Amino acid sequence: MTDVTPNAGGNRAGNSLATQDARTKRRNRAEARFKAYGLTAILVGIFFLVVLAVSIIRSGSPAFTRTVVDVEFALSQAQINEAEEQLFKTAAYAAFFTDALKRQIDESGMEVAVDEDAIERIIGKPGSTIREFFQANPDRIGTPVTFELAASSRVDGYFNGRVTRESMQDSRFLMAGDLDLVDALAEAGVIRSSINWTFITGADSGVDNPGAAGIGASVVGSFFMMLVVLVLSLPIGVAASIYLEEFAPRNRFTDLIEVNISNLAAVPSIVFGILGLAIFIQFAHLPQSAPLVGGLVLTLMTLPTIIISTRASLRAVPPSIRDAALGVGASKMQSVFHHVLPLAMPGILTGTIIGLAQALGETAPLLLIGMVGFVARGYPDGIVSGFMDPNSAMPAQIYTWAARADASFYEKAWGGIIVLLVFLLTMNIIAIILRRRFERRW
Amino acid sequence: MSLLKTTVSAAALAALAAGSAAARDNVQVAGSSTVLPYASIVAELFGDNTDFPTPVIESGGSSSGLKRFCEGVGENTIDVANASRAIREKEIKACAENGVTDIIEVRIGYDGIVFASQQSGPAFTAFEPTDIFNAIGAQILKDGEIVTNPHNTWSEFNSDLPDAEIAMFIPGTKHGTREVFEEKVLLIGCEETGAMKAMMDGGMSEDDAEDACLDVRTDGKSVDIDGDYTETLARIDANTNGIGVFGLAFYENNTDKLKVATMSGVTPSTETIASGEYPVSRPLFFYVKKAHIGVIPGLKEYAGFFIADEIAGPKGPLANYGLVSDPELADVQATVANEKVIGGGS
């Protein structure tokens, strides 16, 4: 390198250390340039991160508020009996509600045209909320109850700016005249915006009922999947890497295993989905759409990541530690478990959390085992049903919402991304805390 | 230590797997992404209105749904396949080979296929099947000769259409919609332009000519969309000249972004589709495995609930979402009630 050749043929004499010669200046300039490149790279990164964060939050925040209609009304036992006799019970409940709201508007003396169809276009699908409430609280039958019910997706869009009077076109979903009624009701305080707890706690809903859709059930699904992944892949992965790194003889066979592990880490995730379908569902007869199967498939996907990072952190432990342990008479196993493994722990945990985070965001393998689609089972009843009952996962739920026709679901998909990011952030914070606790210096 | 953990977790897993031998309690459905919205509406209502758990509905396209349907009988196979086209003879055969012999066909209603473009884009307001064929057919008739499609803009072959680049986004081959698009638009266009006759005069057999009519140009002017309509919408959003093929219900949900073109002079709407005036429409189906009725709880109830007057009738929630309800719904209800399978018998 030219840098190390000391001024061949140059006239060093006469140069003071205080003044820079041309070469030093050039070197300093190169360093300054390099710093500038680095800074630019970081700034570009930050810029994209900010753009991404702002666009996610801006598109997703409407999902966390919703427009609700407050209505106080009572149902008699006779009305409930009448509704329960029908096939489409929730529609009957919704009809009682529409009547009550119409009466309330008529009595309030608002000067606005009201007909039942308009009310049906403004409110969402109140039937199931009402039915569930009275089934859970039979003692409230006959007494006035105030319900906070979700408005239809178009009215919701009108409140958060997605639908404007200019952009909307009359359809059976919403007429221009309905907006006058909405304005009047908003002024009277019957329709208002509120925080959308349903979005955080609820399960998926039908495509015509975005007001009832929530991500909560799929968060639980993701949680159970991650549990399976953690419980299986951490012990298997760590055991495999300790054996390969510390005990296994170096021969053709272990080389072959090593190459295969590296290869598996690069296999597209959909391949694991196909494998999962063939082995876990068609051969082992595990239930379809179950978080257990999802977790097993993701375990296969995560294992190589964990093994590779665990081996790297085992290799990073200085040989002097091993030698010292062996030197004072520890057995090979004692040296590994008492000295090497604790020192490698922070690296292993980081690798595991990165593997889990990757698995958390994976949709493709879930496609084939039936976890992507309309899975609206609600919350599992217990631990076993949490593993075995059909459920979705967060990325699958986001994917499903993004494909729906109603723009309101598109907002919910972005809202789901926010929830997913919060989940990931929590996992990373846990990883950092664990790493700090286990970290040892020597 | 790790070994112990591994053994324990493996044992726990085995215990869980053993527990799963209990019967599946929910209906499992897969298939057409066109039927998916309707099925999800019904599934939610079914869960809300009955004591059965909400069915699980997967998407993926008619063909892949029917393929999974025909994999066999048993709890680890699906109970119902949604399809935006009728089941084919060779699919029935494939089913029978795997032991799926008794299939109940349920027609839920009709769906229109519309051609829509950006609200503020060029004035694509009226199409004929011939226009679509001239725009995206691989081989077309020009000046009495069959040539490889040379057209770049719409006005080159129809001066009534805007002078805009041809950019069509059509459903991919795994979608049932593609078959209807081919049959009711491309083939008709091919016949009406005279291209089919010219091909047959050129020595092709009728079948070969029909196949050639359905070939779509591959130079990027026509793009197959394998995803959902939202993907088509995103492509249209990004391309002022883009024309997409959508389901009527999807278009009606997005009238603020899309404008629709008439086909053969008829505006698509539930009324014109129900009356049969609008030419590009097709029936939607779902198929039920009879062997699963009585094994999977709620399967027959789900099928019956789906096509009840209150749900699939003209005033029901499906019609409100954009399904054109079946005028012969009573016959369909009888089919389900009597568990009448394809190919006669009951």
Image: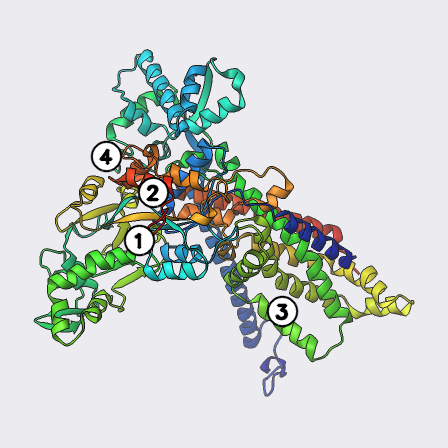
* Residue B244, x across and y down, in percent: 26, 54
- Per the image, the residue denoted by label 3 is A261
* Residue B327, x across and y down, in percent: 24, 39
**Which chain's residue wears label 4?**
A
Q: How is the image coloured?
A: rainbow
Indicate which label's residue lies in the foreground, 4 or 2. Answer: 2
The residues bearing labels 1 and 2 have C-alpha atoms spaced at a distance of: 18 Å
Indicate which label's residue lies in the foreground, 3 or 1. Answer: 1
Q: Same chain for the residues at labels 1 and 4, yes or no?
A: no
At horizontal 76% and vertical 76% (from top left) the residue drawn is A249
Residue A408 visible to the viewer: no
- Per the image, the residue denoted by label 2 is B335
Q: Quadrant of residue B23?
A: top right
Does dot 2 land on a helix, a strand or a loop?
helix
Does dot 4 land on a helix, a strand or a loop?
loop
| Lower position in the chain sequence, tag 3 or tag 4 | 4
**Which chain's residue wears label 3?**
A
Residue A170 is tagged as 4
Indicate which label's residue lies in the foreground, 2 or 3. Answer: 2
Q: Amino acid at mark 1?
A: Arg
| Lower position in the chain sequence, tag 1 or tag 2 | 1
Q: Same chain for the residues at labels 3 and 1, yes or no?
A: no
**Which chain's residue wears label 1?**
B
The residues bearing labels 1 and 4 have C-alpha atoms spaced at a distance of: 31 Å
Q: Counting other residues with Cα less than 10 Å from the Cα at mark 1, is it few (<14), some (14-19), or many (20 or more)?
A: many
- Per the image, the residue denoted by label 1 is B85
Q: Quadrant of residue B276?
A: top left
Residue situated in front as seen by the camera: B168 or B30? B30
Asked if marks 3 and 1 touch (Cβ < 8 Å), the reply is no
